[in-house]
Image: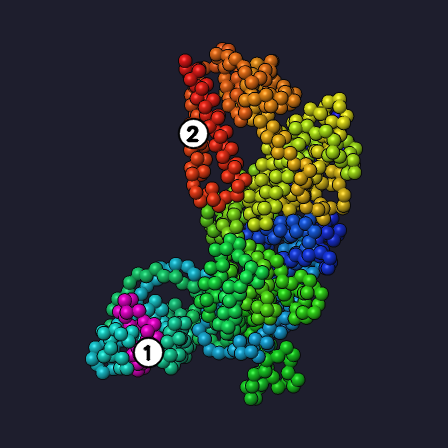
Amino acid sequence: MEENKEISLPPKYDPTAVEKGRYDYWVNGKFFEAERDEKKKPFTIVIPPPNVTGKLHIGHAWDTTLQDIITRIKRMQGYDVLYLPGMDHAGIATQAKVEAKLREQGVSRYDLGREKFLEKAWEWKDEYAAFIRAQWEKLGLGLDYSRERFTLDEGLSDAVKEVFVKLYEKGLIYRGEYIINWDPATKTALSDIEVIHEEVQGHFYHMKYPLKDGEGHIEVATTRPETMLGDSAVAVHPEDDRYKHLIGKKVILPIVGREIEIVADDYVDIEFGSGAVKITPAHDPNDFEIGNRHNLERILVMNEDGTMNAKAGKYKDMDRFECRKQIVKDLQDQGVLFKIEEHMHSVGHSERSGAVVEPYLSTQWFVNMQPLADAAVELQKQDDDTKVHFVPDRFENTYLRWMENTRDWCISRQLWWGHRIPAWYHKETGEVYVGKEEPADLENWEQDNDVLDTWFSSALWPFSTLNWPDTDNEEFKHFFPTNVLVTGYDIIGFWVSRMIFQSLEFNDIRPFEDVLIHGLVRDAEGRKMSKSLGNGVDPMDVIEKYGADSLRYFLSTGSTPGQDLRFQWEKVESTWNFANKIWNASRFVIMNLEDLKYEDIDLTGEKSVADKWILTRLNETIEQVNRNVDKYEFGEAGRHLYNFIWDDFCDWYIEMAKLPLYGEDETAKHTTRSVLAYVLDNTMRMLHPFMPFVTEEIWQHLPHEGESITRASWPEIRKDLHDTQAANEMQQLVAIIRAVRNIRAEVDTPMSKEIQLLIQAKDDRTVSQLEQNRHYLERFCNPSELTIATEVKAPEKAMSAVITGAELFLPLEGLIDVDKEVARLNAELEKLNKEVDRVQKKLSNEGFVSKAPEKVVEEEKQKEKDYIEKRSKVEARIKELQS
């Protein structure tokens, strides 16, 4: 038929052309904006805010694609969906980037001063926020930009102050001296998440500290000899018989000459090394705790930049690692250092600067974690309507382990970019004032220079984005708590846990119902992506080559929840092939719908077995997709969609639909067009969350109601269109056609060549069914003569096949090799023996029979009967050929 240029799809699938301008159409149409409709059930996902330090990587693409799939499904299911966008100021990371840019210009932040530097940081934020939004657009994320937030927004800053002040007033925030992670390069404290531990080849330095009384010495060892200058004691285990007599005695600290005491502490491991350890409370977290128990002096021997200070004596102003070399030499010269051994150990490095992190005594602000962690652990003991559900549930243990072993949280950072701590110190009295507002007599006060850890503000993200602390506002009341958080397993402790305990503390409720955990995107060899390996993948490069739909489908279906995902270009290409298959099939359908309108779609008329089958398969696919997306099993949902679209709809139904479409029966044509339009429409709706661009383009060319597929209703199972009998009949037809095609291929007989086909049906009913669908067998098997009966005389030299309910014979005189045919049938017999064995083992398993649904057990019994029947026919045919 002649193509209608206006209503038809272009001949070639071009993702760039399909995706161009579509996002603007969605955003301008406000299809992603939440309505705050009290009649609709709310559904909220807040985007894990990306850092404004750079562009999004492939992990972000995976994370946000999963969120977008969930929100698109829920929107189509009639929920009032809020998918809230936003970004994180990312304190230390962004400041490091801005400072690096300034260094290129020969300027430091101190040259600019705080205010001018912050102006530069805001310029950076605006630039990179624009990059991120452009990438969200490319990915097709259905975000409600009318509610976009940033962690340094005025409203979110108010929330941060509210939380800080309230926790301070409750005694849950305090200021004190503690050992923290210190980055000497950026001169700031780091959170644990900002420390990357790497295995490094180092050394163990063994030393002899002489006893003051001259009665020998005690052996200690260290990996950081430069810290010995700050030693305050030597510790031994109280039950260690080797040292009991030395407890309370003094040793002389080499080089320094200071007297330090030998103390007893249960922390010491008797079995490790000499059983005696040097204690440096200002430079080691464990030594700090021992120092507290024994009231030891905290001697800080290092400056913030990693150089030695005045308390390091003659080593003052030396870099810490240069000092290490010199001290080692000096100790060897004095005969104190008697052994150096190779030692592979884990060393913390700053994620941002790469510098070796220094455990460092510093006055910082802390959150007292114990009561907050206890409440969060208690929450998980509550019922399902109260607790947070982790998917997969094994990650709940990861969360609980972190909560049960948490330490007080150092929340202050020596930065300028971030939420400045709302604490002021009186210039004369030193009094501390903490409040949301500045002190009235501000001229007498000086505000704390530090800012808060980025995680402090992002911990409030699920509710601070909804105008909290105003809990009476309609946004908060309607959309909080949120429904799902999608994130990676690597930040369960650092972010997920903090959101939970802050929400419990301030809202007395979980911040989200479900936490869907995914893994990391790795390269094809399973390696973690990194700059050093050069194996990273830019999602924008993938989109440019294959389109966003192909990337999204690959990311969402390539892994099960909680598992890592291997990025493979060939798999993305295969998803492009899938999109191309959909495009070509849709183009055929649209060209053949002619002027069919939505209201003309009629499924009440006389339907063929193919019509009934595809409508039944559509119902089954809707059921399977629903079941799997409800469990966040997007890979399984995608597999069912793929099989239905590629195999059932494209390869079988469309081919069978050509018979009535190209025939003379106008009623049959109309029914076929109606079925094609209905099935393709519903299929595009199900596929839409995975592949939003191509499905919108196809849907717009189909007869439909509404402006956009984004707001179309989610497909529903229609029982009136379910016909199990027709589905079984169709499966039998497909099995016959496949068997004939396979046999033709084996003996190199093309479909264009007519051959005789004999079908021996197991009963008259099967004969009747096959006769009713004779036209399909004649069209797709191309027989010169087709015989269907309960009794047929099998030709001596014929290829054969056994299917459910029938046996096929294809007399191929001169083409058949009896030995090869017997070998083929023996291979088939072996497969059937395995199937019989498998199903019988299953049915003999009492646990399966008693626990599985009755329907499933019956299906297995039917399979057993079918396999045994097929096996006996294959055995009979082998015997016949060999006689």
Q: Are marks 1 and 2 in contact (CB under 8 Å)?
A: no
For label 2, the SS is helix
Q: Is residue 270 visible?
A: yes
Q: Which amino acid lies under the numbered mark 1 shown in the image of this protein?
A: Ala
Amino acid residing under circle 2: Asn
Which range is magenta?
253-280
Identify the residue at image location x=56%, y=65%.
499
- Element at label 1: strand
Instruction: Give the mark nearer the N terminus: 1 vs 2.
Output: 1
Q: Residue at x 77, y 31 (%)?
A: 594
Query: In the rendered image, which quarter is residue 731 located in?
Result: top right
Picture coordinates of residue 158, whole percent (x, y): 65, 72
Which residue lies at the image location 75% right of the left edge and 34% below the top edge?
602
Q: Residues within 10 Å of mark 1 (few under 14, many from 20)?
A: many
Q: Nearer the viewer, residue 752 or 153?
A: 752
User: Where is mark 1, residue-wise?
Assistant: 233
